[in-house]
């Protein structure tokens, strides 16, 4: 039986726009055609044990110099997934209708590639991540969920893979999302999506 939180997550994913800098309606999304894909890593022999629910308060990605507070994001009035505000103190945002990092399912964290007149965004180097690199989500209860990058994909926003990003999975996973490519109107043409799995050894 599907839990209320998972039902709310699935409903939000199906009924909303996914916004990473520009929006997509899931009912218009198609299978992605990645332009820059790193093959997924083979699952470890020992599956990582899921963590208890605790909201993320900080995100660290050492390989690209990210060490940012994490705010909570919900749905905007138009049904789109909120994004962090354009501000000088740019930070990442966790979509609170997704599982908390380390819980079963795909936890989703969004960030900007640029923040207008303020310059580079917190996820400006997201596309540089490579398979096996570490992502650490520090949680409100004082623990940390440590992930290993599985794949990095650059996709056209028109072909955003909603099912692959939001769809239910039976293990703890993480998605980091930002924009990429040339500007298109008020947004960007592409999205960068990092897929990561909870590390079995916590390192």
Image (spheres, rainbow, N blue to C red):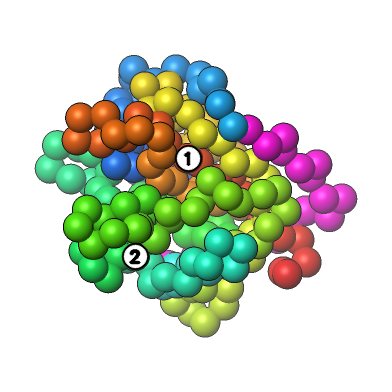
- What is the number of the mark on residue 192? 1
**Residue drawn 23% across and 68% down?**
88
Report the residue marked by disc 2: 91
In this rendering, is residue 82 above or below 183?
A: below
Main secondary structure of the magenta stretch: loop
Tell me if residue 4 can be seen. Answer: no
**Residue drawn 30% across and 26% down?**
25
Q: In which image quadrant can residue 43 be found?
A: top right
Q: Is residue 44 magenta?
A: yes
Q: Is residue 126 magenta?
A: no
Q: Is residue 203 left or right of residue 28?
A: right
Tell me if residue 198 can be seen. Answer: yes
Given residues 116 and 82, the one toward you in this image is 116
Give x and y (percent) for residue 80: 23, 38
Q: Which residues are magenta?
A: 37-55
Name which of mark 1 and mark 2 comes first in the sequence: 2
């Amino acid at each position: 039986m599907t839990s209320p939180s998972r039902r709310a997550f699935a409903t939000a994913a199906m009924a909303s726009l996914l916004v990473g800098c520009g929006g997509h309606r899931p009912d218009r999304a198609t299978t992605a055609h990645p332009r820059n894909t790193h093959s997924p890593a083979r699952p470890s022999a020992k599956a990582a044990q899921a963590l208890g629910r605790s909201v993320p308060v900080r995100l660290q990605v050492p390989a690209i110099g990210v060490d940012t507070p994490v705010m909570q994001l919900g749905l905007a009035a138009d049904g789109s997934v909120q994004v962090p505000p354009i501000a000088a103190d740019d930070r990442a945002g966790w979509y609170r209708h997704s599982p908390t990092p380390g819980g079963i399912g795909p936890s989703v964290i969004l960030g900007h590639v640029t923040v207008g007149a303020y310059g580079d965004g917190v996820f400006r180097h997201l596309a540089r991540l490579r398979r096996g690199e570490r992502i650490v989500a520090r949680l409100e209860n004082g623990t940390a969920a440590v992930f290993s990058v599985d794949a990095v994909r650059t996709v056209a926003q028109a072909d955003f893979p909603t099912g692959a990003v939001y769809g239910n999975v039976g293990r703890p996973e993480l998605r980091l999302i930002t924009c990429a490519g040339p500007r298109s109107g008020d947004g960007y043409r592409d999205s960068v999506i990092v897929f990561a799995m909870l590390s079995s050894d916590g390192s």
